[in-house]
Amino acid sequence: MMSDPLAAFREAYQEWERTILQPTLRRTPERDADFTTVSGESIKRLYTPLDLEGTDPVRDIGLPGAYPFTRGIHPTGYRGKLWTMRMFAGFGSAEETNARFRYLLEQGQTGLSIAFDMPTLYGRDTDDPLVPGEFGKCGVAVSSLADMEILLDGLPLDQISTSMTINSPAAIVWAMYLVVAEKRGIPWSQLRGTLQNDILKEYIAQNEYIFPPEPSMRLVVDTIEFSTRHVPQWNPVSISGYHIREAGATAAQELAFTLADGLAYVQATIERGLHVDEFAPRLSFFFNAHNDLFEEVAKYRAARRIWARTLHERFGAQNPRSLWLRFHAQTAGCSLTAQQPENNIVRTAIQALAAILGGCQSLHTNSMDEALALPSEKAVTIALRTQQIIAEESGVANTVDPLGGSYFVEALTNRMEEECLAYFRRIEDLGGVIPAIRRGFFQSEIADAAYRYQREIDSGRRGVIGVNRYAIKTPLEIPILEMDPHGEARHLERLNRVRATRDNALVKRRLEALREAALGTENLMPPILDCVRAYATIGEMCDVLRDVFGVYREMVVV
């Protein structure tokens, strides 16, 4: 009688393969298909305990709320609290976006998420001659504190959390939010929210950067330091893999490059003089939720385990909250199709389910029309209802980490971790994240992965329903959002009024103080806050920093 259960199973597996599987394959061969993940990783026919040989269930998988947090950071999962339903919104003028926020809150949304337009993302005022025609196209226009006051008008900032997707000028936009709260008499200690503020991923994937990496890192650390001291419930950085994945990265690349960025921020903040346990509990993450449900779940589980171990072993973190990888997820915009847009409702539901099964803390679900235009009210309502149906009707929130212990999921989690750690070694060999950025390493890896994926679609090897599978020609039948045609004129009128009625001598002094601080080494948040209070515009403040720091030009990857 065998005493080793694994040996006994191996024998049973061989017998099954010989007597059941092989005769079945001779009678009915498997489909002629590539059995791979979305990222192109091969998937075995069957996963068994043999695939987890060497995995220690205590050391590697553990229990929810316990190190290494593979199964989640909270011991009760969603039984204690559902994820925050945080729909990303922003378009046109501050007035239009404020109205959308009010509507979403009335429909049951539980957190705000602000998208900014391209001029704002690049630190330019709407009337800057370099940005004609870009007003409000991909988010809301915010040129000064006056816009932020209207954007947040009537919203209970002391009762809800707010996420802001802004990177290079993040410190300035955050200062506007803080000053709005200040003017309302809301203590900063009561504010909850997240600043994306992940400049490294801009150089890697999204390209919405202004300054070179080194001064940009200084600004990120300034916000981390300032929030640690003055806004203790705020997440000063949302380390983002979302845009890395949208640029064409594989799931493993998204995981590895995102965590590498996060570790770079940890190292830089420690070098500033803060202890890891002072600031690490407020770092957060932002991941993509793509089509391959099991690959995505494995990615999130591996992310938690790698982050906890690295913060503990490399940086000596002792506070359990420092080891928590808390993350927001957004369904994959790059998976949406303009053809048969109703199909995107199904895609989004599967992707949302992956994020929830993977243990996200907050979630945005994309709308069916986003490959065509900014979301209409009808489309965004369906996207929000998708989350609400999963939360209240599917049963997946009844137990913690429902896929934990699955041979398939645990094997994918292990493989994801191995690939991530292999990338860590390659990045370290290049001298770290910023040297790797300057050498084009990340950009080249992503470009290669994106090219392979697109080739698979173009050749027909990878099917996209409604595009290269089951395509039909039908007229578009969904409503498309129409923005206020007078929104830009109203915004520009307000911008000109601000410039005409503010104390311009004070603005000049405050901008000069910002310049002097930027030339030195002090934290830039206090002088930025002073500029915002004086109604200096985002373009004026960024022009000062552009003059001091310079503008980054990316190397060409060939």
Image (cartoon, rainbow, N blue to C red):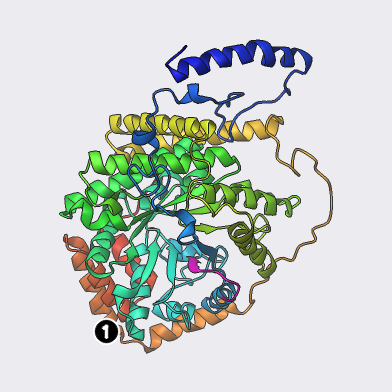
Side of 397 relative to 376 (left or right): left
Q: On the image, which quarter does residue 548 sit in?
A: bottom left
Q: Which residue is drawn at the image coordinates 26% and 68% (left, top)? A: 525
**Percent position (x, y) of residue 463?**
70, 36
Q: Secondary structure at mark 1?
A: helix
- Residue at 49% in and 38% down: 298
Q: Above or below — where is 541 with respect to 293?
A: below
Residue 439 visible (yes or no) = no
Q: Along the line of sight, which residue is nearer the eye, 471 or 140?
A: 471
The residue segment tinted magenta is 106-115
Q: Is residue 107 magenta?
A: yes
Please check the rendered image and state whether residue 77 is part of the magenta-colored stretch, yes or no. Answer: no
Q: Can you tell which quarter of the image residue 476 is in?
A: bottom right
Please give the name of the residue rendered at 26% of the width and 49% of the height, measured from the top-left corner: 266
Query: Residue at horizontal 77%, vertical 38%?
Result: 469
Q: Mark 1: few, some, or many residues within 10 Å (few <14, many ≥20)?
A: few
Q: Looking at the image, which is closer to me, 25 or 535? A: 25
Residue that carries the numbered disc 1 in the rendered image: 505
Residue 57 visible in the displayed image: yes
Residue 150 spot, x, y in % from top left: 47, 81
Vertical relation: 90 (above or below) 406: below
Q: Amino acid at mark 1?
A: Ala
Q: Most extreme residue toward the front, as rendered?
A: 1
- Tell me where residue 318 appears, x and y as whole percent: 21, 48
> In the rendered image of this protein, does residue 416 appear above or below residue 508?
above
| 182 relative position to 469: left or right | left
In screen coordinates, is 530 left or right of 203? left
